[in-house]
Image (cartoon, helix red, strand yellow):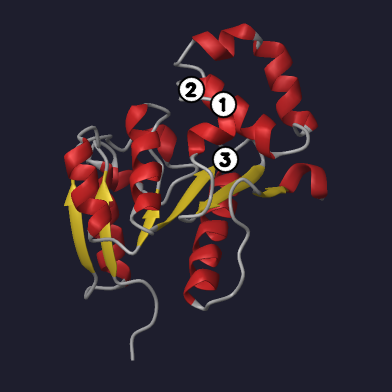
Amino acid sequence: MEHGFRNFILIDGDAVEVNNLNRQAFRLEHVGRNKAQALTSIIKEINPRARIEAYQKFLKDEKLAEELIDKSDVVVNMADPEEIMYFINSYAQSKGKIVFFPMNPAWGGYLLIFTSDSPKLEEIVGGKLKGNIFYLALFEKTVSKFPPTLSKLLKKLGKKLLTDTSLAGPQLGVANYLTSSLVVTGIIKWLSGEPIKKAPEPIFMDLWENL
């Protein structure tokens, strides 16, 4: 008997870079390959019977987003803060699909879970914000206070962080794997019929401050 997740739809137009290897599941042999393609090979190594649809492009088209969401049971929204990010959440909610929205703030793992009765993402942050200002607003609106480690970074970078899209907060391996664990655990709890926290209530764990 097989257990675990078997059917996947992956979409990503990015390529694996060396600086991804410290915090993502890729290996040196994957550098230069499309991320959706590389992840397909990793999943196949774990479960050769897995059924995977891989799209080697960035999701920009709303019609394609609708098609992919319509045939999915669970949506993990990791799109950048642009119009399509809001569309994915909103359309999935309108179709009664559960949406997992992860983020990696410094040493912490962060997750929002959206259901059909959750507020929309733009309602939580106060509009369809773009770029780094979205992440700051989302964290500020859903968590009572910034972790001291993150506050130091914000004070150091100041307004530059809001205007320079090439800048991002540190994404550490431990935080990425913590966030991934939150997503997988949330999906399993949902499948088991167990109660789960729903947006706008966040699931947030800060490894640095809580140790």
Residue at 45% of width from left, 16% of height from top?
166
Residue at 32% of width from left, 33% of height from top?
84
Q: Are marks 2 and 3 in contact (CB under 8 Å)?
A: no
Vertical placement of residue 85 versus 155, above or below = below
Q: Is residue 13 left or right of residue 141?
A: left
What label sits on residue 104 in the rendered view? 3
Q: Quadrant of residue 77?
A: top left
Type of residue at label 2? Leu
Residue at 38% of width from left, 59% of height from top?
96
Residue at 49% of width from left, 44% of height from top?
23
Q: Nearer the viewer, mark 2 or mark 1?
A: 1
Vertical placement of residue 190 versus 68, above or below = below
Q: Is residue 175 left or right of residue 86?
A: right
Type of residue at label 3? Asn
Rendering coords of residue 124 (x, y %): 58, 35
What label sits on residue 96 in the rendered view? none
Whole-number angstrom distance, CA of label 2 to CA of label 1: 8 Å
**Where does label 2 land, which residue?**
129
Whole-number angstrom distance, CA of label 2 to CA of label 3: 18 Å
**Where does label 1 land, which residue?**
126
Badge 2 or badge 3: first in the primary sequence: 3
Rendering coords of residue 134 (x, y %): 53, 25
Q: Quadrant of residue 152?
A: top right
Rendering coords of residue 26 (x, y %): 36, 49
Q: Nearer the viewer, mark 2 or mark 3?
A: 2
